[in-house]
């Protein structure tokens, strides 16, 4: 048992060190770009329920006064309609759309309704809990490039979750912040970028329309992965930019936390199943499963082994916190370190829950069940 524990520990250390080194290398190679300006319509699918919703939307309007904002709300979402009606008095338009029908992704259905209203050369998609800092759109435009032959076709950013709030809000932030830096940039560096961060991405409007628009992915469960496939299958280039955007998500309690993590793990499981490369299964999957495996082996090995696992998890969390501060400008309280350690141990358990009822999940205010590849609502 000691030999097996030592073997898994070495694999974890080497794998995590490799991910950190590759992330640092990506940042070293992708130098900041000078801001570029173009007319952009930012489409934000809005769903009520989060106390920070209005503040997030207002912050985006304030931070990007030159952009055109189009907010989409469902006709039966009274609270979202009230909030967006107040904001519409500023520089944004509101589009009221019908609730998603059976077979439709709720986010993509809104975007499909909005795209015909986009009159600018560029479009951006932004989640309603995401805040773009001042200048972020200009940075994304620069990463896209002014000419398709000399740049990319779809640019995405790097989310960093804000860590203020209750225990489960901070635990969710610890999970995301503890993985994003060593996942998206590493995939981009290794040429394994087969999905994107769906919280924010930007591209050319004519390109998207030429690929069939959002109608082409209206029935896909994982909208970010489907969007990436739409572009990659057409031979287009995804660009991982250095744009860092805060995300504010309020997690109300244990059940809410488990619900969000379960949905994300269902998405991740589908992605891993369809992309079984050494990068996804080995470097990402292996280092994700290792903490829980190490704890199980340590319990059978002895107290010294358990202490070593704690040291390894703490070292990973401390080093990544420093890297996020240096590379992403993130400033997190040291109390996030033990939460990141806990999140690393719990993640395999969240993944394990997808074995039971893998087709059922909660998405904001809707209960979804997959019947084959078809989205249905309960």
Image (cartoon, rainbow, N blue to C red):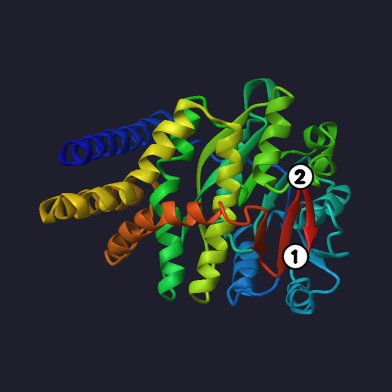
Q: In terms of depth relative to the viewer, which is nearer, 46 or 343?
A: 343
Report the quarter where the N terminus lies.
top left
Q: Quadrant of residue 227?
A: top right
Q: Hey, which quadrant is residue 365 in on the image?
A: bottom right
Tell whether 29 sits left or right of 57: left
Q: Is residue 250 visible?
A: no
- Residue at 86 percent across and 54 percent down: it is 113
Question: Is residue 206 depicted above or below 366 in this figure?
Answer: above
* Mark 2 secondary-structure assignment: loop
Q: Is residue 164 above or below residue 116?
A: below
Residue 82 rendering spot, x and y as whole percentages: 77, 79
Q: Which class describes the residues within 10 Å of circle 1: few (<14), some (14-19), or many (20+)?
A: some
Left or right: where 233 falls relative to 156: right
Question: How dense is the environment of label 2, judged by Cα within 10 Å: few (below 14), some, or many (20 and up)?
Answer: few
Quadrant for the C terminus in the image? bottom right
Q: Position of residue 330 (x, y in %)?
A: 38, 55
Q: Nearer the viewer, residue 277 or 30?
A: 277
The residue that mark 1 highlights is 91
Residue 378 versus residue 226: which sits nearer the camera? 378
Tell me the number on the disc at residue 120: none
Tell me the residue that label 2 is attached to.
373
Q: Is residue 282 left or right of residue 114?
A: left
Between 258 and 38, the one lying in front of the other is 258
Residue 98 rendering spot, x and y as whole percentages: 88, 64
Residue at 50% across / 31% down in the picture? Answer: 188
In the rendered view, tell whether residue 272 sits above or below residue 339. above
Q: Which type of secondary structure does the marked residue at label 1 adopt?
A: loop
């Amino acid at each position: 048992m000691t030999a097996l524990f030592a073997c898994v520990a070495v694999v974890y250390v080497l794998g995590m060190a490799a991910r950190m080194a590759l992330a640092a290398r990506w940042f070293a190679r992708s130098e900041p770009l000078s801001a570029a300006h173009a007319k952009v319509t930012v489409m934000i699918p809005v769903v009520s329920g989060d106390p920070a919703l209005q503040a997030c939307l207002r912050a985006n309007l304030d931070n990007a006064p030159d952009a055109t904002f189009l907010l989409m709300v469902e006709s039966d979402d009274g609270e979202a309609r009230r909030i967006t009606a107040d904001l519409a008095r500023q520089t944004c338009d509101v589009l009221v759309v019908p609730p998603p029908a059976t077979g439709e992704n709720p986010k993509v259905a809104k975007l499909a309704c909005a795209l015909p209203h986009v009159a600018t050369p560029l479009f951006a998609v932004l989640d309603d809990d995401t805040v773009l800092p001042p200048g972020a759109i200009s940075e994304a435009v620069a990463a896209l490039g002014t000419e398709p032959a000399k740049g990319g076709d779809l640019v995405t950013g790097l989310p960093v979750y804000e860590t203020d709030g209750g225990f489960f809000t901070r635990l969710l932030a610890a999970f995301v912040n503890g993985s994003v830096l060593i996942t998206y940039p590493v995939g981009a560096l290794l040429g394994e970028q087969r999905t994107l961060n769906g919280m924010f991405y930007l591209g050319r409007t004519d390109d998207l329309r030429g690929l069939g628009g959002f109608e082409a992915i209206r029935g896909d469960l994982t909208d970010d992965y489907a969007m990436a496939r739409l572009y990659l299958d057409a031979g287009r280039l995804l660009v991982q930019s250095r744009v860092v955007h805060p995300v504010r998500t309020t997690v109300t309690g244990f059940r809410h936390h488990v619900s969000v993590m379960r949905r994300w793990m269902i998405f991740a499981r589908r992605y891993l199943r369809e992309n079984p490369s050494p990068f996804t299964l080995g470097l990402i999957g292996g280092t994700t499963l290792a903490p829980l495996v190490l704890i199980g082996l340590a319990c059978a090995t002895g107290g010294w082994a358990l202490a070593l696992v704690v040291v390894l998890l703490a070292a990973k969390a401390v080093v990544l916190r420093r890297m996020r501060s240096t590379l992403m400008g993130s400033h997190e309280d040291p109390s996030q370190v033990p939460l990141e350690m806990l999140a690393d141990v719990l993640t395999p358990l969240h993944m394990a829950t997808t074995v039971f009822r893998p087709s059922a999940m909660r998405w904001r205010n809707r209960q979804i069940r997959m019947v084959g590849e078809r989205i249905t609502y309960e």
